[in-house]
Image (spheres, rainbow, N blue to C red):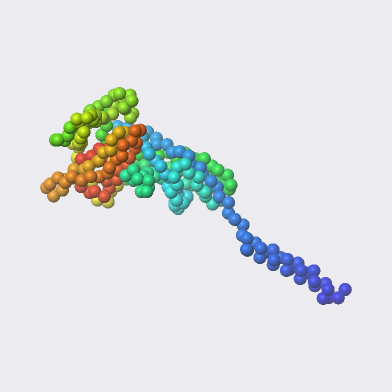
Amino acid sequence: MTRERMLHPILALFLAIILFQSCNMVNPKESVPTYIEIDSVRLDPTISAVHGSLSHKITDVWVYYERQLLGAFELPARVPIITEGRGQLQVIAGIWDNGLSGTRTKYPFFTVDTFTFDAKPTETIKHVPVFKYRTTDTPKVNYFNEGFEQGNSFEKRAGSLASMVKTNDPTEVFEGDWSGKIQFDDTTTYAEVITTQEHLLTPNRDAYIEMNYKSDVSMVMRMEVYHVGTYIYSDVIGLKARDTWTKVYINMGALPLLFNMVNLKLS
């Protein structure tokens, strides 16, 4: 056998190795995600006398993996994560700012849920995030609560044709034993009710009003602002009629002024 003929199998093997490696470079191995399934969330009780109602309308979750944002996901959510080994998720509650689905944002008054898991590519891991209201010192948060179980500071404005009264009719109460009610009829077609509590908003701080309401007529929430020695009145938000109880988060953080309002939470 000649030398040239002996080299042919070696050369063929070398070419096959190059071809095999080239195929891997063109079609690299794809990473397979682990899926985190979040169908619902839970808001745990803290101090109801401080935080008010524990009802919520958390519509989304903002998900971080090792403090890197993966995205905002509408509930129920299925979150793909490409990783290996053990890692931690951070989940932040998301709401509709001012009740609008186009203004989704993180809610600043709930704690962050953390969840440690072992990656299992192709598999789905179920998780229910648990949130609480932040404590008043991490960092400092002020809560103002206006309810109907005891007394309240709502009063009828001059010119209003109806007052707010308390009702304990089970078909009209949202939670607990009492709710506030304004009744209209053919002759009573206008009502304006205001809380006498005053609250000071300061710049660069989050501020929200949380409100649960049910109504068969539309209404407008207004604020009474004291500024430079005079009172200014301005509409804040219009609320559509709802035949079931609805939660709304009203963003007041851009208004660093003194005003009268209800269920205010300040951070």
246 is higher (above) or lower (below) than 79: above
Res 258 visible: no
Q: Quadrant of residue 238?
A: top left
Place of residue 71 in the rendered image (x, y in percent of width and height, measured from the top left)? 45, 51
Q: How many numbered markers are drawn?
A: 0
Horizontal placement of 70 versus 136: left or right?
A: right
Horizontal placement of 239 versus 79: left or right?
A: left
123 is higher (above) or lower (below) than 9: above
3 is higher (above) or lower (below) than 186: below
Q: Residue furthest top?
A: 169
Which of these two is toward me, 78 or 92? Answer: 78
Which of these two is toward me, 31 or 74? Answer: 74
Which of these two is toward me, 208 or 112? Answer: 208
Q: Residue at x 75, y 67 (%)?
A: 13
Which of these two is toward me, 85 or 149? Answer: 149
Place of residue 123 in the rendered image (x, y in percent of width and height, measured from the top left)? 58, 44
Place of residue 90 in the rendered image (x, y in percent of width and height, measured from the top left)? 44, 46
Q: Residue furthest right?
A: 1
Place of residue 207 in the rendered image (x, y in percent of width and height, measured from the top left)? 28, 45
Res 97 visible: yes
Q: Quadrant of residue 219?
A: top left
Q: Quadrant of residue 262?
A: top left
Classify the position of the N terminus by image quarter.
bottom right
254 is higher (above) or lower (below) than 128: below
Q: Residue at x 26, y 34 (%)?
A: 146
Classify the position of the C terminus by image quarter.
top left
Q: Residue at x 53, y 46 (%)?
A: 35
Q: Residue at x 36, y 35 (%)?
A: 55
Q: Residue furthest front?
A: 186
